[in-house]
Image (cartoon, rainbow, N blue to C red):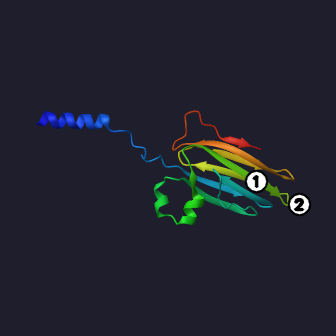
Amino acid sequence: MRKILLLAASLAMIAAPLRADAAEPEINAALSVMGYGHTVKITVNGVDVGITGGSSQSMRLFNKGHPFAAKASPQVRARNFVLVPGENEFVIEYARAPNSRDRLEITLDAEGYPKPLLVFTDSGAGGDRRVIKLKIESKAPADFRPLVIN
């Protein structure tokens, strides 16, 4: 009887498919914007995260499957739980106020990374729309280098 139970358990482990709903790795990042003298809009994976510019703003971003998502309100979940493991698309749209001399600076720091993933600065007189693709994992790869855009 014992051999039959061991055989059944072994066959069950072999035959069991990999779980499709396996927990995805936790991603936790901080998006910071020094946007004095600028209007700014940032979308992450197609979602407007609520950055407006004109001041210093900072917010936490998490992956959609992060454990905190279950406790967050629907509004917070919609704006802050937008990251996915792997490639993420950040769209930065900005315009400088006519009399401003301020520099726009945007950084993205992620837990598990030794330096910011993204450092974006602009001192120009106009504005722009930039599409930036960043690969984000729960831990920095061995060959990690920050993306610096001036």
Q: Quadrant of residue 142?
A: top right
The residue lying toward the viewer, choosing from 149 and 11, is: 11
Q: Is residue 62 above or below residue 149?
A: below
Give the image location of residue 54, x and y in percent.
76, 63
Single out the mark in the foreground, 2 or 1. Answer: 1
Give the image location of residue 12, x and y in percent.
27, 38
The residue lying toward the viewer, choosing from 79 and 100, is: 79
Give the image location of residue 58, x and y in percent.
64, 59
Q: Residues within 10 Å of mark 2 (few under 14, many from 20)?
A: few
Single out the residue that lies furthest toward the left.
1
Give the image location of residue 46, x and y in percent.
65, 52
In this view of the protein, can residue 115 be seen by the observer? no
Q: How many marks?
A: 2
The residue lying toward the viewer, choosing from 101 and 27, is: 27
Kind of residue at disc 1: Glu
Query: Mark 2 to mark 1: distance in Å?
Result: 16 Å
Single out the residue that lies furthest toward the right.
99
Q: Which residue, given by chain and number where applicable, does mark 2 sit on?
A: 98
Q: Which residue, given by chain and number where applicable, does mark 1 sit on?
A: 93
Check the picture and name the quadrant holding the N terminus.
top left
Check the picture and name the quadrant holding the C terminus.
top right
Marks 2 and 1 close (CB-CB < 8 Å) = no
